[in-house]
Amino acid sequence: MFRTRALFARSLTPLADRVLVRRAAKEVQTAGGIYLPSDKAKAKNEGEVLSVGPGMRDVSGTLHPPTLVAGDKVLLPEYGGTKIDLNSEELFLFREDDILGKYTE
């Protein structure tokens, strides 16, 4: 008799004004063509929004919806955010007001 173990993928839904972001991959090659070691490569300060919370309530109870939506490309601070390993993927959880800007094309 064989026993199989099902692997369940976990998901995360941000609360309040939190935003779940996947950072862009590190640059391992410079503009001049020089390859950098992976520990010296600088992480890009941009990412893609994966999920957004419902928004923040003020003192009177009014809900203020977030300005970001899933799929937006954003400019992130160099430091900050909460690192989360979800389904063997490195994601970051930021407050919406910590995100510096949104790219438009």
Image (spheres, rainbow, N blue to C red):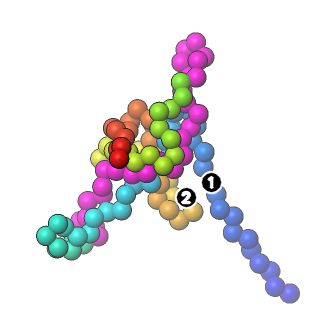
Q: Left of 46 or right of it: where is 88?
A: right
> Badge 1: few (under 14), some or many (20 or more) residues near its Cα, within 10 Å?
few
Q: Is residue 75 above or below residue 24?
A: above
Q: Left of 35 or right of it: where is 79?
A: right
Q: Which residue is mark 2?
A: 86
Q: Position of residue 97 (x, y in %)?
A: 40, 32
Q: Secondary structure at mark 2?
A: strand
Q: Position of residue 50 (x, y in %)?
A: 51, 50
**Distance of label 1 from label 2 (alpha carbons):** 7 Å
Taking the view exactly as shown, the residue that stands out farthest to the front is 105
**Residue type beneath disc 2:** Leu
Would residue 83 be seen by someone viewing this image from the given angle? no
Find out whether residue 45 is within the magenta segment.
yes
Q: Residue at x 69, y 64 (%)?
A: 8
Q: Residue at x 30, y 55 (%)?
A: 44
> Badge 2: few (under 14), some or many (20 or more) residues near its Cα, within 10 Å?
few
Report the quarter where the N terminus lies. bottom right
- Magenta residue span: 38-63
Q: Residue at x 44, y 46 (%)?
A: 72
Instruction: Residue 86: name its quadrant.
Output: bottom right
Q: Nearer the viewer, residue 16 or 79?
A: 16
Q: Residue at x 51, y 38 (%)?
A: 18
Q: Which residue is mark 1?
A: 11
Q: Position of residue 19 (x, y in %)?
A: 49, 42
- Give the mark, 1 or 2, whose residue is nearer the N terminus: 1
Q: Is residue 86 above or below residue 37?
A: above
Circle number at residue 91? none
